Amino acid sequence: MVDREERNRTGPHEHRRLGGNPQAADAQCVAATAWSSVLGGCHRCGAISPAVADSGIDLLDDWSNHVAGLNQTTGLPMPPMTCTSTRDRIVEAATRAMTARSYNGVGLNEILKNAGVPKGSFYHFFESKENLGIAVIEKSTEDHLQRLRTFYSDRTKSPLQRLRALCQTFRDEAGEQPRRECVFCKLALEQAGLSEPLRAAIRCSMEQTKALHAQLIREAQAAEEVCSRFDPEQLAEYVTVALDGAMIRAQIEGGPGPIDTFMHFVFDELLKP
């Protein structure tokens, strides 16, 4: 095993500890020899020689892919994975685990085991579990916004009909068995008073959702479907908060009742022309 102090000592080029994990680096030094002979780098830690670094090739990703393809116990090759698919698997496994249980109720080791990803590879993509939680929120937000855009861009319906169609879909899903749970709602409730970075990600998600609602409300006002005396930004804020609350309550109750109530007061009372 290579002495850690010796491995960290800089020579003609800087030594890198694989994925920030000294133990993984030691276990993989032998496997690194063949790889570094191709890269022109250090056989102990995979550091890249200046000549190869100047070539413009992203060898850090190549090296990380290679390490991710090694059995962490034996150092023998496993089926290859790409950086993108590895990161996506981690985020997907975390989303499923946090949806089924909670952010605090699931450990990092469990997430990585379900993703089939070694811990050293995790730290290539994320600094901490908190950073992973932010990635889960961002991916959930991306999917949600794309869904809203699909509904709101349907020009075969009027603006208010588009909003109603979206809410009806949420309502129908709340009545499905087994019922769907929303990881965003869970994290919003769990982390709102705990982690400021996670809170900031949640606020950003809500602001993006509100912006889409506001644009649709402006279209509805231009089409004289919604009263023009309403400020579209304030009305969008109300719709966003009320709909999120109805969806959380629907998860708690295990049925669509809260969304039915939301739809009645919003469409039959508040948004009547």
Image (cartoon, rainbow, N blue to C red):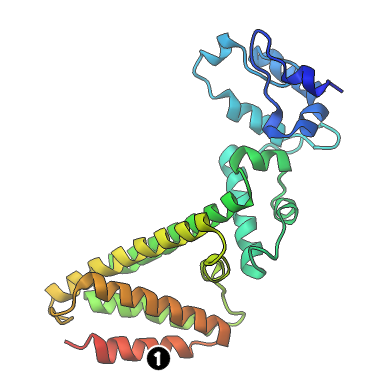
Q: Is residue 99 above or below residue 39?
A: below
Query: Percent x, y for residue 164?
Result: 32, 80
Does 132 sit left or right of 23 as displayed?
A: left
Residue at 83% over, 20% down? 2
Label 1 crowd (10 A; few <14 / some 14-19 / many >=20):
few
The residue labelled by disc 1 is: 261
Residue at 82% over, 31% down? 75
Secondary structure of the residue carrying numbered label 1: helix
Query: Percent x, y for residue 214?
Result: 25, 68
Q: How many marks?
A: 1
Q: Is residue 132 above or below residue 121?
A: below
Q: Identity of the amino acid at label 1?
A: Thr
Residue at 24% over, 78% down? 160
**Where does the C terminus fall, quadrant-wise?**
bottom left
Query: Percent x, y for residue 8?
Result: 72, 20
Q: Nearer the viewer, residue 214 or 204?
A: 204
Q: Nearer the viewer, residue 159 or 46?
A: 46
| Quadrant position of residue 266 | bottom left
| Quadrant position of residue 176 | bottom right
Residue at 62% over, 80% down? 178
**Where does the N terminus fall, quadrant-wise?**
top right
Does 179 sit left or right of 163 as displayed?
A: right
Does 153 sit left or right of 146 as displayed?
A: left
Q: Nearer the viewer, residue 183 or 86?
A: 183
Q: Is residue 254 visible?
A: no
Q: Is residue 31 visible?
A: yes
Query: Percent x, y for residue 37?
Result: 71, 13
